[in-house]
Amino acid sequence: MYFSYDEPLFRPPAEAYSAIIQATLGCSWNRCAFCEMYSSKKFKVRNIDELRPEIETLSRIYSDAKKVFLSDGNAFVLSANKLIPILEEVNKNFGRIQRVSSYAMPRDILSKSDDELKSLKELGLKLLYVGIETGDDELLKLIDKGETSSSTVEGILKAHNAGIETSIMIINGLGGKKYSGQHAVNSAKIINQINPKFLSTLTLSMPYGENHFRSRFQGEYIPLTMVELFEELRTFIGLTDLNNVIYRSNHVSNNLILSGTLSKDKETILEQLDRAIETTPRGVYPTSPGVL
Ligand code: SF4
């Protein structure tokens, strides 16, 4: 059986064994200063008639799949009217599905009613990946995220109220030295308000180089050394006050692998960060892994 995707295609690490359905192509926003994931793609909504045979084929290729991930960038931008037939088709074809998930922006959640979100949850859409990147309003503007801390909290809590869980991404080093303190403090503040099911921290990477990032970032960017990245992360984790949040820092962009449940494992994670701060030479900059 032959199947090909419209590349490039991205999915969260936790969706490595999921069947991936390209419900949309590209990202409807495509403006975040640090992101080049879909800069080569024009955003497109795919029609259910086009998707039906693909879902059927994928269900035969991934006949044991327990999870389905709807891509690309923010497939949750689709209206409930468009998502419902896709989920119905997934349920009809995949016998063992336990969870459907997708990337979402807070505005994609806010554009749906409570009843629509509950219907989507009942059809299996149980998890949304939201790259909030920072809880700091100034930095959100400088990276052109198109969201504020309050729209982010409102959107995510709306999903939680409908029974949809979230996996939240924060970017370590996002604003460089100048904004590092406010980024750490306000990101902890927003995470404490949200208390998501999953939390991960990635590290800012620049696949097209620092100059390209500078041309898109609307503030003054002064890169952080490796120790300063760990210190920023330490401030962030140190200020979190969470209940049973599964935390991972295991993306290819990360220089230190961390994992645990917050706040239960907070002290252990802080000790690991303290050791890294003590043992890493000052003045050393991380080499960008060139990931998108
Ligand atoms: S970070 Fe997400 S919302 Fe921003 S441009 Fe990239 S894919 Fe789109």
Image (spheres, rainbow, N blue to C red):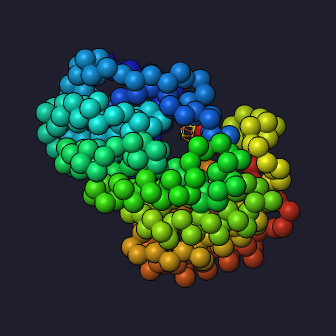
Placement of 162 over or under 91, stated as above or below: below
Q: Is residue 246 left or right of residue 234?
A: left
Which of the 4 image quarters holds residue 47?
A: top left
Q: Residue sitting at 42 percent across and 63 percent down?
A: 196
Of 255 and 243, the residue lying toward us: 243
Q: Position of residue 15 (x, y in %)?
A: 38, 45
Question: Does residue 35 appear in the picture of this structure?
Answer: yes
Check the image and name the residue furthest to the right: 283
Which of the 4 image quarters holds residue 90?
A: top left
Q: Residue sitting at 34 percent across and 51 percent down?
A: 127
Q: Quadrant of the C terminus?
A: top right
Q: Quadrant of the N terminus?
A: top left
Question: Does residue 224 appear in the picture of this structure?
Answer: no
Of 223 and 273, the residue lying toward us: 223
Q: Position of residue 242 (x, y in %)?
A: 46, 75
Placement of 243 over or under 131, stated as above or below: below
Q: Residue sitting at 84 percent across and 67 percent down?
A: 282
Q: Which quadrant of the figure shows ligand 1? A: top right
Placement of 180 over or under 58, stated as above or below: below
